[in-house]
Image: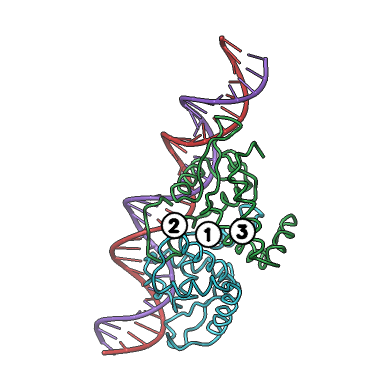
Chain colours: A cyan, B green, C red, D purple
Amino acid sequence: MEASKKRSDCPLGISLDVFGDKWSLLIIRDLMFGNKCTYNDFLKSAEGIATNILASRLKGLEENGVIEKSAHPDSKAKILYRLTPKGIDLLPVIMEVYIWSDKYYEMPTNLKATIKEAKKDKDKFVKQVTKELKIKMTEKKSSS
Amino acid sequence: MEASKKRSDCPLGISLDVFGDKWSLLIIRDLMFGNKCTYNDFLKSAEGIATNILASRLKGLEENGVIEKSAHPDSKAKILYRLTPKGIDLLPVIMEVYIWSDKYYEMPTNLKATIKEAKKDKDKFVKQVTKELKIKMTEKKSSS
DNA sequence: TAATTTTGCTTGCATATTGCAAGTGCAAAT
DNA sequence: ATTTGCACTTGCAATATGCAAGCAAAATTA
């Protein structure tokens, strides 16, 4: 997970060293679609990540330039986590995982429409959502 | 990794329970692009997976219907591992990871052309390679 | 035919990672 | 002034990983 070790020159291996674990992509999902942006937000997610694991993953993702910390406009006690452009660029990867999952597993009702839209025109969906995310991650948001 | 445990109803979480670790996607990569199909083939890959981990990952991927075992036409001592249609359907996911990696990391020369082709027309690339894989995984191949 | 090698694992054991509970320090609310 | 919220850290047990060795069946070599 740490930025240092590299098992091979294969781009897939390098990528898996960045987000190839059970938790990293879930954090990125929360930032993309969950309207979550603080440590406590992530903790509250359904999967129940442990506090130390969350801390280590946030550190790893930050070291790898996928997310970044910033001051929360609402409070000095809060830290705002945001996706970097590099993190936003993981949208196609996550989208394809959802599409795969939709084909072989049960899709929760509240996601069906979104996945359907994504499948209909992937490029359009990625462009649209990327645009929204760029805005979202730039604005100094004042709470959800 | 085992087929049983499910952390949440999120399709992303379910997917990560199937291939969300440091090794599974590398095995799938070897099956897709590496012309590898036996236990020893996977062992020889650059990343150097341990024998027990490889065995447990093969078991997990089989339990989850991503790969399947079959008799190797060359020898009874060999076991042929193949991607199922479900496994082949992971191609778009892996492709997007490569494309992401290409943007932010060094791409080995021998892969540049393929990635460029994939980026030019993703749908076409996926259809083309899927077709090839379906054939490859169906034929009782007589060695690489 | 017998010995050796190949193949696909399993086993033992040391080390690393994970998960859970509790605790810490600072900020903010009461 | 005290309590609560937030972002962690720490300790420790449980689990997973990595490494080396071993093992049985099949194939190859002698």
Q: Are marks 2 and 1 in contact (CB under 8 Å)?
A: no
Subunit bearing disc 3: A
- The residue that mark 3 highlights is A14
* Relative depth, front residue between B60 and A36: B60
Give the residue drawn at x 58%, y 30%: B75
Between the C-alphas of marks 3 and 1, the distance is: 9 Å
User: Which mark is on residue A70?
Assistant: none
- The residue that mark 2 highlights is B17
Q: Quadrant of residue D9?
A: bottom left
Asked if badge 3 and badge 1 are on a common chain, one would say: yes
From the viewer's perspective, is B86 left or right of A7?
left
Rendering coords of residue B67 (x, y %): 51, 47
Q: Are marks 3 and 1 in contact (CB under 8 Å)?
A: no
Q: Which amino acid lies under the numbered mark 3 shown in the image of this protein?
A: Ile
Subunit bearing disc 2: B
* Relative depth, front residue between A70 and A29: A29
